[in-house]
């Protein structure tokens, strides 16, 4: 029995090494895929609802800065009334960004007639400023805005002040992010099989559980 146990030890170590390689590779591929998905949907970027039809007090939303990067400040409007398409915004806005210490990092005042924003047939985007922010995510910033003068023609529109992380067009190379889900899933399946072999040999079930959790995470991102 002792001889059999000793002879199975090298095989078990080999299985552990193969599982670790497959699991680590799957995680790496999944991380690249997740980064591409989250970047494309502007995950974590603040959006502040504003009612452009009438004046309002200051409103604000918190957000966090994940390292240094360029941010695009913009006014966006979704319009469901196509009969008003082409109507230009004649109101006035004020926008501020506060750093974690409560100091004004950016202040933008946009008098009536200076914002080239209008009601489109569906969606319209107007850039207000381009900023560079640098901080770490444990500190909280705030995006604030108020409508100084409203425009009643925008009563049925949904408008927001957005601070988006600037995305450079990756071109065809950007497809790499999405194709990485294939090797991620394949390597996780291999890792799950190796984890099952280890469990059958009396080893810890942790590799199998970790592999199943990895597969569940991949499935969750796809659904």
Image (spheres, grey):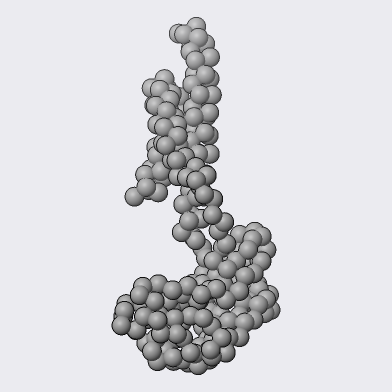
| Residue 179 x/y as whole percent | 45, 40
| Residue 17 x/y as whole percent | 54, 24
Determine the residue located farthest toward the top in the rendered image. Answer: 3
Residue 101 location, quadrant: bottom right
Residue at the location (42% across, 89% down)? 53
- Image quadrant holding the N terminus, namely top left
| Residue 117 x/y as whole percent | 48, 80
| Residue 212 x/y as whole percent | 39, 37
State the count of labels: 0
Residue 206 seen anywhere in this rendered image of the structure: no
Check the image and report above or below for 141 versus 199. below
Check the image and report above or below for 80 versus 114. above
Residue at the location (49% across, 60% down)? 43
Residue 138 location, quadrant: bottom right
Residue 83 seen anywhere in this rendered image of the structure: yes
Check the image and report above or below for 84 versus 15. below
Residue at the location (41% across, 45% down)? 217
Q: Nearer the viewer, residue 10 or 115?
A: 115
Residue at the location (65% across, 77% down)? 106
């Amino acid at each position: 029995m002792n001889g059999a146990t000793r002879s199975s030890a090298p095989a078990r170590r080999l299985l552990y090494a193969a599982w670790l390689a497959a699991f680590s590779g799957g995680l790496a591929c999944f991380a690249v895929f997740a980064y591409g998905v989250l970047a494309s949907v502007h995950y974590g970027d603040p959006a502040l609802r504003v009612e452009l039809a009438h004046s309002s007090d200051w409103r604000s939303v918190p957000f966090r800065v994940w390292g240094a990067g360029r941010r695009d400040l913009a006014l966006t409007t979704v319009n469901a009334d196509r009969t008003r398409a082409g109507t230009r915004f004649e109101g006035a806005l004020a926008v501020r960004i506060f750093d974690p210490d409560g100091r004004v990092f950016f202040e933008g005042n946009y008098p009536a007639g200076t914002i080239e924003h209008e009601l489109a047939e569906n969606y319209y985007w107007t850039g207000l400023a381009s900023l560079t922010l640098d901080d770490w995510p444990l500190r909280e910033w705030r995006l604030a805005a108020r409508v100084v003068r409203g425009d009643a023609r925008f009563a049925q529109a949904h408008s927001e002040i957005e601070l988006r992380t600037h995305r450079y067009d990756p071109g065809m190379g950007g497809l790499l992010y999405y194709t990485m889900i294939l090797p991620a899933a394949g390597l996780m399946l291999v890792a799950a099989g190796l984890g099952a072999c280890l469990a059958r040999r009396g080893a810890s079930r942790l590799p199998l559980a970790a592999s199943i959790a990895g597969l569940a995470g991949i499935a969750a991102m796809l659904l």
